[in-house]
Amino acid sequence: MTSADRPATRLATRLSFLVAGFGIACWAPLVPFAKARLAVHDAILGLLLLSLGIGSVAAMLATGILSARYGSKPIIIAGGLGLALVLPLLAIAGSPVTLALALLAFGAALGSIDVAMNIHAVEVERAAGRPLMSGFHALFSIGGFAGSAVMTALLTLDLGPLASTLVCSALMLITMWLASPRLLRAAQAQEGPLFVLPHGIVLLLALLAAVTFLVEGAILDWGALLVIGEGLVSEAQGGIGYIVFSIAMTAGRLGGDAVVARVGDRTTLVWGSLLAIAGFVVLLLAPRAAVAVAGFLLIGLGASNLVPVLFRRAASQTAMPTGLAVAAITTAGYAGVLLGPAGIGIVAQAGGLPLAFWMLAALMSLVTLSARTVTAKP
């Protein structure tokens, strides 16, 4: 048994995904406190939040280069520690400039660990000789649930933003302390060029990742507004769609490795994307709330294993070094999350939110149509 195929190494990989999901989710409940503390309006807050995205994307590009030379372990450790150490600064930043800088650093830590842990996961899965990627990504989702729940609970207990972040940071530090010695010493370290422009099949993988992440971001940012605007639910119940979508996404990923091992990557892409498209159709034609919720459920289940398969295909392609390919795909995915919802807003302004969601269903069909190309042997 190689070090990459040891249970301890798989555990360390899962813990890395857990920390990444937990860390970013801890920030969401702090946003209202930051806005009130700085007394800024929505436009300024939006610009401040953009700092997190800028830091993430910049770090993702650098992580692909550094991982190609030094391996993923030191970057995973640095990213996890960065999330834990910067989080309390988000609770005390006293001016827009200091919050912007803290968010930039927080985003850089998130982007670094995100790319590096996926590179590490590719190596661990390759050594195991069986699908593991969906399970790893499920831990990110579980971390997200845990982070938002723990932070919200601490704030509800009037512990205060700073004390709450210190507790969450301590939990992340303990988890990284457990994971660090079990990570591969030099996963994916390689000789060769430190930078290669994305090309060949990697460009297609990056495009499909952007589409899939865009769908996730759209459900988060616009799903509630869609069902409220169609008169299916009240404002107080608008968030139920995303809750069901998230649960379905997590459940799909927890069972995804077994499904992919049985049916293969190509079938997973085809039927997963078709199920998501069917979910959009059900959602957009829903006559009542229960049917709309079923649409969110189908979208979550269908989309749950698409991204893990795309990362797996990045490991099998030969057009680029694996680490750089994973970085390109991750960056494209984040671009879909960051820029896509704004594009949906433009389309919704021009033709209505339902039209924008029909366009999402059409974009998802690209995954269906590209499945054969993506999964062809190099």
Image (spheres, rainbow, N blue to C red):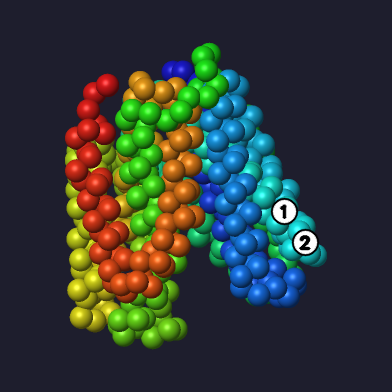
In the picture as drawn, the residue positioned furthest to the front comes out as 350
The reply to whether dot 1 and dot 2 touch (C-beta < 8 Å) is yes
Quarter assignment of residue 70: top right
* Type of amino acid under label 1: Ala
* Type of amino acid under label 2: Ala
Q: Secondary structure under badge 2?
A: loop
* 340 to the left or right of 144: left
Residue 100 placed where, x, y %? 70, 57
Quarter assignment of residue 260: top left
Q: Residue at x 42, y 30 (%)?
A: 198
Counting every numbered tag in the picture gives 2
Q: Residue at x 35, y 21 (%)?
A: 318
* 60 to the left or right of 319: right
Residue carrying label 1: 102
Q: Nearer the viewer, residue 11 or 338?
A: 338
Residue carrying label 2: 93
* 292 to the left or right of 97: left
The answer to whether residue 66 shows anywhere in this view is yes
In the picture as drawn, the residue positioned furthest to the top comes out as 191
Q: Residue at x 66, y 75 (%)?
A: 41
201 vs 268: above or below: above
Q: Secondary structure under badge 1?
A: helix
Q: Nearer the viewer, residue 95 or 13?
A: 95
Residue 160 placed where, x, y %? 74, 70
In the picture as drawn, the residue positioned furthest to the right comes out as 94
Q: Nearer the viewer, residue 134 or 351?
A: 351
The tag on residue 288 is: none
